Image: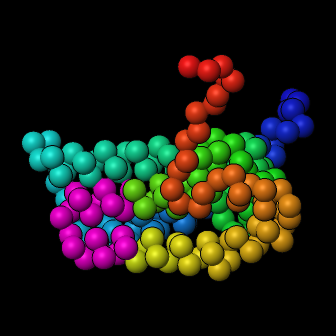
Amino acid sequence: MTTEPGSWSSAWLALRSLLWTILLPGFFAGYVPWRFFGLGKAGPHVSSPTDLAGLLCIGLGAALLAACIVEFARSGRGTLSPVDPPRHLVVGGLYRHVRNPMYLSVTIIVLGEALLTWSSALGVYWVIWFLGANLFVIGYEEPTLRRRFGASYDEYTTQVERWVPRFRVRSTGARQ
């Protein structure tokens, strides 16, 4: 029985990515809202626009988070954990439009959960989560990425906004 040289490393990377997904966003966007804010008791009603908006946010946030995790593994060869980060600067996928789509994805999920549960306490948690993520990004991640990737990270930060996606339309050079 033979295996391709990269298959074990890819499988190990996938396993690590799954583990860190469960431990980090799974904790903040799953366990905490479920355990402390009544997410487990929420029964969505398809006739409620707020519940539908909540479900849409949760689904969209989960899909965007999955895309970020795959991009970290595929092009960065690492995971979302600060102790197992990408080996290469990730600038593709959603990272072409915003520097922190993973945090925004979790923020969208928690917002959806707040809408679904009608919980003002979960709404406050959502605000605290976003402020905490912002402090972590500014105080730890950005300086760490600057030290690790140098000029390429500096150039990236001039091209891509921290929180607000900027979608550029590519010009063909022709006048219209």
Q: Position of residue 134 (x, y in %)?
A: 54, 73
Range shown magenta:
109-127
Q: Quadrant of the C terminus?
A: top right
| Closest to the observer, 120 or 142 | 142
31 above or below 54? below
Q: Can you name the residue that lies furthest to the front here?
A: 175
Instruction: Determine if residue 91 is in view.
Output: yes
| Closest to the observer, 76 or 139 | 139
Q: Quadrant of the N terminus?
A: top right
Q: Position of residue 86 (x, y in %)?
A: 76, 57
Q: Is residue 28 magenta?
A: no
Q: Position of residue 35 (x, y in %)?
A: 32, 72
Residue shown at 35%/51% (left/top)? 58
Residue shown at 64%/60% (left/top)? 80
Instruction: Determine if residue 12 is in view.
Output: no
Task: Indicate left or right for 171 with 111 as reference.
Answer: right
Q: Position of residue 91 (x, y in %)?
A: 71, 48
Q: Quadrant of residue 154?
A: bottom right
Residue shown at 66%/19% (left/top)? 174
Is the magenta region chiefly helix, strand or loop?
Answer: helix
